[in-house]
Amino acid sequence: SLRGSGKPGRQATLAAALRSAGHVPFEFDPQSGRLGWPADDGRGLLGQPPAALASLQAWLELVHPEDRAALRADLLAAPAQPGQAGPASRLRMRDSAGEYRCLEMRAARHEEAGHTISVGTLVDVTPRRQSELRLALCALILETIHEAVSVSDRDGRILWANAAFGALVGVARDRLVGLDLQQFAAAAGARLVEQRQAMRDASICGLGQAASNPLTTVMKYFPDEFKEAAE
């Protein structure tokens, strides 16, 4: 903790170092509800002036309503062992422009002259959170599309495959991981041929019967290229 780090000058130096790395240190007194910002250089937090962050209640007014109870609980339930930081938690807080940013917080308890306070750091993880949401969206799309998709390493071993790929090769997804992708190339090509013929036989109009013509042409006149692409 900053308070346990020695002389006031040393504390200020550590606080400034944390601030320069994007981590904002804070101190919270559960008895009085007072908040302190050891590295206060006039910037406050997310552009909010320090005066707006002088107490827990004032801070809560800037926190998203759905995150207020969790923030209060995290501050009051910091690990009982002094100096031991609790697990990271996230909260949404309004910046000076009125936009919510995602913050990650870690808190610990510090005892001084028989008085216990909570100390911790806050860091803006909004870019990381946005990346996580984009990755989750990509994963959802890959899981639900009808096209067969697989991911393999440089040796051709399957690392991940969606449900459509498992259905195409006729192997359960949990059994695909670690298998050689090339062993399914021939099976995939044969399945495409079956699907092409089924489409022709089942279609009652010329458009449906001709839909597979591009695939048929490629397989007929460029068999080597087709095989290479399938592998």
Image (cartoon, rainbow, N blue to C red):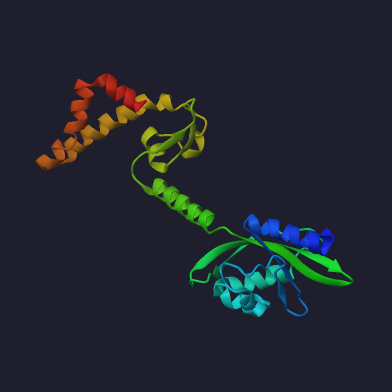
140 displayed left or right of 31 = left
Image location of residue 181, percent across then percent down: 44, 28
**Quadrant of the image occupied by residue 9:** bottom right
Looking at the figure, which quarter contains the N terminus? bottom right
72 displayed left or right of 230 = right
70 displayed left or right of 138 = right
Image location of residue 225, percent across then percent down: 28, 22
The outermost residue toward the top is 224
Residue 1 in view, yes or no: no
Image location of residue 153, percent across then percent down: 49, 30
The outermost residue toward the left is 206
Residue 198 in view, yes or no: yes
Q: Nearer the viewer, residue 58 or 108?
A: 58
Looking at the figure, which quarter contains the C terminus? top left
Seen at 33% across and 23% down, the residue is: 228
Image location of residue 34, percent across then percent down: 72, 77
Q: Nearer the viewer, residue 76 or 58?
A: 58
27 displayed left or right of 179 = right
Q: Can you say whether 202 is above or below 24 in the image?
A: above
Q: Nearer the viewer, residue 172 or 184?
A: 184
- Image mark count: 0
Q: Can you say whether 197 is above or below 70 in the image?
A: above
The outermost residue toward the right is 113
**Quadrant of the image occupied by residue 216:** top left
Q: Nearer the viewer, residue 34 or 163?
A: 34
Seen at 69% across and 71% down, the residue is: 73
